[in-house]
């Protein structure tokens, strides 16, 4: 097995993930995984593609993430790991697709329109 570099995206976050055979070491932006994502839920979501194909301790994951918030960054890492696994072994794709790991979540924040408070919220209407 060789090193694999893939890109994953969610909301405004973009993650570049380097997947290499190893003992399960995970770093994000050159910081420890536990330090970067203190919540257990976020760490589980990020590594869920490896869990889905039962390869949790077999790869070292080094991720560079920028943009978006915590939730978007977790989703971007998850997407990138899933894509890297598919590059390594095409036969893993059905299992990853079943868990929804391969599909890119395209939902983005809607832009604010002029004349409105937010994207859709209006100012209060006054008849008189």
Image (cartoon, helix red, strand yellow):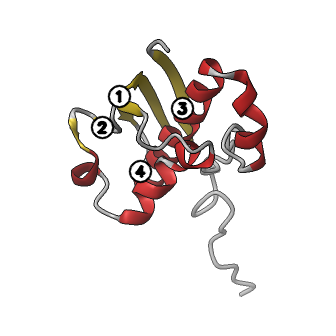
Residue 32 horizontal side relative to residue 68, left or right: left
Residue 50 image label: none
Element class at badge 4 = loop
Q: CA distance from mark 3 to mark 1?
A: 18 Å
Query: How far across and down, in percent of the image, does residue 97 sit?
Result: 76, 41
Q: Position of residue 76 (x, y in %)?
A: 51, 40
The reply to whether discs 2 and 1 touch (Cβ–Cβ < 8 Å) is yes
Q: Is residue 4 above or below residue 114?
A: above
Q: Nearer the N terminus, badge 4 or badge 3?
A: 4
Disc 1 marks which residue? 22
Could you tell me how far apart the alpha carbons at marks 4 and 3 are, in whole angstroms? Answer: 16 Å
Q: Position of residue 60 (x, y in %)?
A: 36, 31
Q: Nearer the viewer, residue 2 or 6?
A: 2
Q: Which residue bears the numbered disc 4?
A: 69
Going from the N terminus, do you reach mark 2 or mark 4 first? 2
Badge 1 element: loop
Q: Nearer the viewer, mark 3 or mark 1?
A: 1
Determine which residue is flagged by label 2: 25
Rendered view: 124 above or below 33? below
* Residue at the (26%, 49%) spot, across then down: 36
Q: Residue under circle 3?
A: 80
- The residues tagged by marks 4 and 1 sit, at their Cα atoms, a distance apart of 29 Å
Sequence-first disc among 4 and 1: 1
Q: Nearer the viewer, mark 2 or mark 4?
A: 2
């Amino acid at each position: 097995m060789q090193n694999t570099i893939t890109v994953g995206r969610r909301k405004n976050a973009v993650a570049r993930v380097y997947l290499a055979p190893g003992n399960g070491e995970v770093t994000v932006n050159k910081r420890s995984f536990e330090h970067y994502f203190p919540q257990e839920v976020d760490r589980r979501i990020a590594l869920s593609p490896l869990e889905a194909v039962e390869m949790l301790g077999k790869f070292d994951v080094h991720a560079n993430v920028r943009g978006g918030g915590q939730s978007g960054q977790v989703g971007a890492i998850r997407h990138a790991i899933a894509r890297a696994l598919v590059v390594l072994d095409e036969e893993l794709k059905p299992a990853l697709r079943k868990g929804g790991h391969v599909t890119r979540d395209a939902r983005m924040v809607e832009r604010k329109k002029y004349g409105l408070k937010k994207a859709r919220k209006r100012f209060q209407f006054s008849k008189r």
